[in-house]
Amino acid sequence: MLLRLKISNYLLIEQLELDFLAGLTVVTGETGSGKSIIIDALMLLFGSRIPKDIIRDSQKQLTFEAEFKLSNPTTVEWLKANDLEDSDNLDSLICRRVIDHQGKNKTYINGNAVTNGQIKALGELILDIHIQYASVTLLKSETQRNLLDEYAGIQTKILYSIFKALNEAKHKLNLAVTKTKVLDAEKERLEVLISEFSALNLKPGEWDEINLEHKQLANAGEVLQEFDFAQNILQGEEYAIIKKISLLNSRLQKIIPYVPKALELTNLLSSAEIELQEISNSLEALATTIELDPDGLAKLEERINIIFDLSRKHKILPEQISEKLDEWAQELDNIIHSNDIAYLEKEVSRLDSEYTKLAKEISIVRKRFAKELGLKVTDYLHQLAITGEFSVLLNQLSEPTGHGLENVEYQVSFNKGIAAQALAKAASGGELSRTALALYLLLSIHNPPEIIIFDEIDVGIGGKVASIVGELLNKLGLVKQVICITHQPQTASFGDNHLVVRKHNNQAVSLAEISYVNSDERINEIARMLGGVKITPTTLSHAKEMLLNTNGEK
């Protein structure tokens, strides 16, 4: 729902801040007063081409800003997918566009700078604007299909997922067929690698262990020699450090009675003697673990050489072998499955059968509801003074798609006896807008857009038919926010809200003013639309009666 529109320095508007309400809002005013300003502003805000000379004289730039409250999940999901949602208020949306004299512009969604393509895509979800000879959303083939599917209760998400999986399977099959030789060569290479390295039977961490063991065996003689030297220092006859410390301790203990502080020295010596003895014991224990084993060393060196040579051959480090084996095994598994042509052919066949079955079921439902929708829209069109017919054509496609086996095209003839043509080629703007009105009245409220705007939907009609248009617009306003620019008092009288556009001229500039009218002001505006320049008591009475009657019909 459009909550607020702000415009500054645009044509007849100097500054405008306008709040919008739910239901049907009608916009009226004298010819040339600027009734289309709201439509033009919204179209420019949502990426329309920028005309020349739209900025008021003496101003550097113009600004459009619109605030919305979102109710359709599709729009909220789009904002999330593009990282443009207001995280504090997911149903809130503020769009802004600033344009300067050179036509340069910047566009923002919830404060984030966006491309023109993004603001256009968002606009198609929020707005459907029907102006003379153009409809922003309804004329698109995708919209026509989505609206029919919504009317028929058709969900195409499952069909699309099957279609996507089918295309992926076909792609894999094509790759498998065209790249069989390449894949076979790669498969053979991986099998050789896995076979050669698996034959090493190298356990995780074993490379580090055998390198440490090799160092110990290769230097066993030197290690034992150093152990012997250390033991000789500690306990041998030549040095006997432990024995000498023990003797020194005994001698110092004799003088303790004369020098009591000598006790501290003897305690230190006792501790040193104990620690040195522990070192001696540890050296002895370590020495028992070291042995001279030429045969073991030769076998170890042979295994190290085999591992190293194979690693160097395939340009990897020995410590990477375990990791590489897992990697190669995964690659081989992928190749085996991707190159399994028989498996892929079976998968393509299975998915194709699933797709065809579901697509045909959807086609049957579309065909039934296409006929029903055509008849119901035609009935509405007859009420709206269009004597022709509306139909929904299902065109068989040469290739299957994610949405089914056919394309949906709306066709209409606006006059009885005239051949139907595609809705996108329809010539009359007013008749086209009335067709859109009939469609939206029949279609679900859950379908985008959230806001529908009609510009002179009632052009070329009057009297009873104009009243029917107003009544149907008001009915549509119960489920959508509808804004309608009209010249017809019958249509205007059905508005839940009534905006009047007035142009003021002075010696310097012309300015447009847009404001809501109620009570007597609204009666006067309807009377103006009924009676022209001169408003008589009879005209006022007629206007008042018209408003009373339409309020009773709502």
Image (cartoon, grey):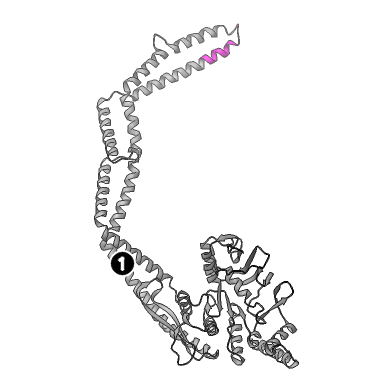
Q: In what quadrant of the picture does the N terminus appear?
A: bottom right
The quadrant where residue 530 appears? bottom right
Q: Can residue 16 be seen by looking at this rendering?
A: no
| Foreground pick, 93 / 60 | 60
Residue 385 point in image, percent of width and height:
54, 91
265 drawn magenta: yes
Q: Residue furthest front?
A: 507
Q: Can residue 291 be seen by looking at this rendering?
A: yes
Name the magenta segment's main secondary structure. helix
- Give the residues in magenta: 258-269
* Neighbour tally class for label 1: few under 14, some 14-19, many 20 plus, Cα within 10 Å: many
Location of residue 329 with respect to 108 vertically, above or below: above
The answer to whether 516 appears left or right of 354 in the picture is: right
Location of residue 540 with respect to 216 vertically, above or below: below
The quadrant where residue 405 appears? bottom left
x 72%, y 91%: residue: 539
| Foreground pick, 443 / 84 | 84
The answer to whether 38 appears left or right of 420 in the picture is: right
Q: Which residue is mark 1?
A: 348
